[in-house]
Amino acid sequence: MTEGISNDPLHGKTLENIVTSLVEFYGWEEMGDRINIRCFTSDPSVKSSLKFLRKTPWAREKVENLYILMRRFHAES
């Protein structure tokens, strides 16, 4: 029996993969403009962002939604 393929765009993605992909696509400055949280606007790093996002569900949800939008943009272009 074969396993079904997940339609979830976050399936198999770690939070680190998501943040890194967003930084590569948008850069820290635009990420801070899109999601105004200090870990993106003041001395940003993947490590500090992960620490904050793992403890802050509302911020993580915003980052995951931005990642989904980014993937849709890639799929359309």
Image (spheres, rainbow, N blue to C red):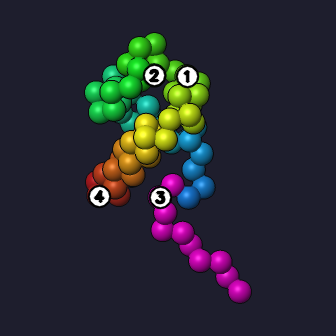
Question: In the structure shown, which secondary structural element does the residue marked by tag 1 occupy?
Answer: helix
Sequence-earlier tag: 3 or 2:
3
User: What is the C-alpha distance between the residues marked 1 and 4?
Assistant: 32 Å
* Residue that carries the numbered disc 3 in the rendered image: 9
Disc 1 versus disc 4: nearer the observer? 1
* Residue that carries the numbered disc 2 in the rendered image: 39
- Residue at image position (28%, 27%) is 33
Is-magenta flag for residue 66?
A: no
Sequence-earlier tag: 1 or 4:
1
- Classify 10 Å Cα crowding around label 3: few (below 14), some (14-19), many (20 and above): some
Q: Between 20 and 52, which is closer to the camera in this rendering?
A: 52
Name which residue type carries label 2: Cys
Disc 1 to disc 2: CB gap under 8 Å? yes
User: What is the C-alpha distance between the residues marked 3 and 2?
Assistant: 24 Å
User: What is the C-alpha distance between the residues marked 1 and 2?
Assistant: 6 Å
Q: Quadrant of residue 12?
A: bottom right
Sequence-earlier tag: 1 or 2:
2
Name which residue type carries label 1: Ser
**Can you say whether 42 is above or below 25 in the image?**
above
Disc 1 to disc 4: CB gap under 8 Å? no
Question: In the structure shown, which secondary structural element does the residue marked by tag 4 occupy?
Answer: helix
Name which residue type carries label 3: Pro
Disc 4 to disc 3: CB gap under 8 Å? no
* Residue that carries the numbered disc 4 in the rendered image: 76
